[in-house]
Amino acid sequence: MKLISASQLAISLAWISCASSLVIPDYNDLIISAESTKSSLSSSLLLLNQRQQSLSYYEILSNYLPSFLFQSKDEGDEEISFQGILNNIGGISSTLSETEVSKGAVIASPSKSKPDYFYQWTRDAALTIKSLIHYLDDEQFNSNDESTYSIKSIIESYIENNYYIQRLDNLSGKFNDDSKSGLGEPKFYPNNKPFERNWGRPQRDGPGLRAITIMSYISALNKYSQPFSNQFLNNQTFVYEEIIKPDLIYIIKNWYKEGFDLWEEINSHHFYTSITQLSALKSAINFIELNNYPESSEFLNQLNETYRNLKQFILFDSGYKSNTLPYIVETPSLLKSGKRCGLDAGTLLGVLHAHNLEFGDYDDIPFDIDSSYLINTLSAMIADMKYRYPINHSKIGFDKAIGVALGRYPEDIYDGYDTSEGNPWFISTASGSEIIYKFIHKLISNKQDIIINQQNREFFRQFIDFDKVPAQDLVTFIKEDSNTNTDVIIRFGSPTYKTLSYNLSSFSDSFLEIVKDHVDNNGSMSEQFNKYHGFMQGARDLTWSYSAVWNAFRWREKTLQLLDSTF
Ligand code: NOJ
Ligand code: NOJ
């Protein structure tokens, strides 16, 4: 019988606890109850091994992936995604009327019923506008280009629009009370009216995400010495004082309170909310310093103190990092109550949204893209969802890593219209790809050797055979003398390093290939795709789907260019 290591076991055990509430069609023989013993786990793994075919990863990939994915550029998908974003923003969209959707308001989807997503969510809007900022940065604000000009003006309309929205009284509270409670309101009508019906409120991630987006924009303007074009916004001090700073005050006053998660369902503490809030605080501290804002030392102290407290909370007090699990726990209270296993795409998205590589990234935000906790979260999500979603069953038995369609979290029952069974989502699947591309990018741009140790061994094992690495590709170290648990260190730039990087990028592409398989003939993307038959469902033309897929393609492009110029 195959021996399994402790970390592999931990991941598999996590799968068991997630699996306790599900029925896996066609794979009933793999269902393991929460009470399962270690021995039934081992026999299930054995069963799995027997199912494995002996095809190599390359053989599978070359049969499986169309050749375009190995070419350097795939503009088609990027462009469709980008247009999908613009279609959903007031003032630039040719299909939305300005009486219904104010200039600069970003609707989540044009769907007005079943489901009704015809609102501006603070979160979706901030994330989407950030993609547009990256586009301008990539294009270097080439002002002769008409589309660049209109994108600049749309970003600025979004900022102006948010000035109005921030000040609306709503069911989360007010703008002007001591804790700025109204800023926790998750969504508004796109004509800038408050939404006054029951909802999962407050959601405390919105202000931080908006602040990050607007600070990124100002940093990008400064990088290319560009002024605002929008008259209302006037100057950077106005935008800082009136729009960014209230959001920062919201975090300072509210970070320790419970609130609803990014999926709008659970009132508690959430990794996604905390890590993005922390990122907003750190961005602000750097931003004020870099731009020499005459900020009071009292406010700077508050920012620094909150940053330290929240970081302490994230790393030690919250339960996001458990002592027994190898992955990040998104909502620790649900793990504690036995309702969920803690795996959640909110973790993957949180890391992606909290680390802003472009405009001053910093190591002081924990759980970066190369953290073994993050990589193990992704691996455990894959391990779970490979079985959970029948459309992934064709991937069972591959002996090397391959992406699968990912959903929000194992226990999800939201089907895009109502509650029944959860499905894979485009944003989750695309984040698998973006994480791996950013991971490769970080390793290579820092010229980092790849350190393989107990925490990440199972992940890397899928890409190279440790026993076959030629001695000259390894950095030698003396195991007995070292305090680390290092197995091997792959030398930066060596042939093994190159193979590993390309294998990782094929892995990353395999998520994008799934995305491509499930879009419709025009490249349109809804929120989800059905776990049995793969057709799209839930809100049509979801802005966030387009933005997430565009981001993944953008990182693909950047990373492949870096790979080409390095090797
Ligand atoms: C709508 C929310 O936006 C979604 O995230 C949630 O899962 C469903 N309502 C069910 O509560
Ligand atoms: C439901 C999702 O759960 C939530 O995260 C999102 O903000 C809204 N839909 C709008 O897209």
Image (spheres, helix red, strand yellow):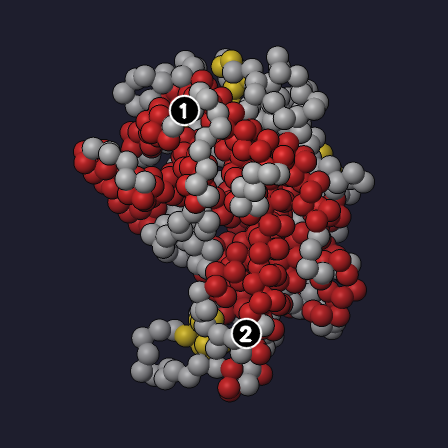
Which residue reaches farthest bottom? Answer: 471
Q: Quadrant of residue 131?
A: top right
- Disc nearest the viewer among 1 and 2: 1
Q: Is residue 183 left or right of residue 195?
A: left
Q: Which residue is mark 2?
A: 497
Q: Is residue 129 left or right of residue 180?
A: right
* Horizontal and vertical percent position of residue 238: 35, 25
* Horizontal and vertical percent position of residue 149: 58, 33
Element class at badge 1: loop
Element class at badge 2: helix
Q: Which residue is mark 1?
A: 234
The residue at 64%/42% (across/down) is 426
Q: Counting other residues with Cα less than 10 Å from the Cα at mark 1, is it few (<14), some (14-19), or many (20 or more)?
A: few
The residue at 65%/53% (across/down) is 511
Identify residue type, mark 1. Answer: Asn
Task: Quote the CA–CA distance across marks 1 and 2.
Answer: 50 Å
Q: Is mark 2 within 8 Å of ligand 2?
A: no
Q: Counting other residues with Cα less than 10 Å from the Cα at mark 2, is it few (<14), some (14-19), or many (20 or more)?
A: many
The residue at 46%/69% (across/down) is 447
- Answer above or below: position of 57 versus 114: below
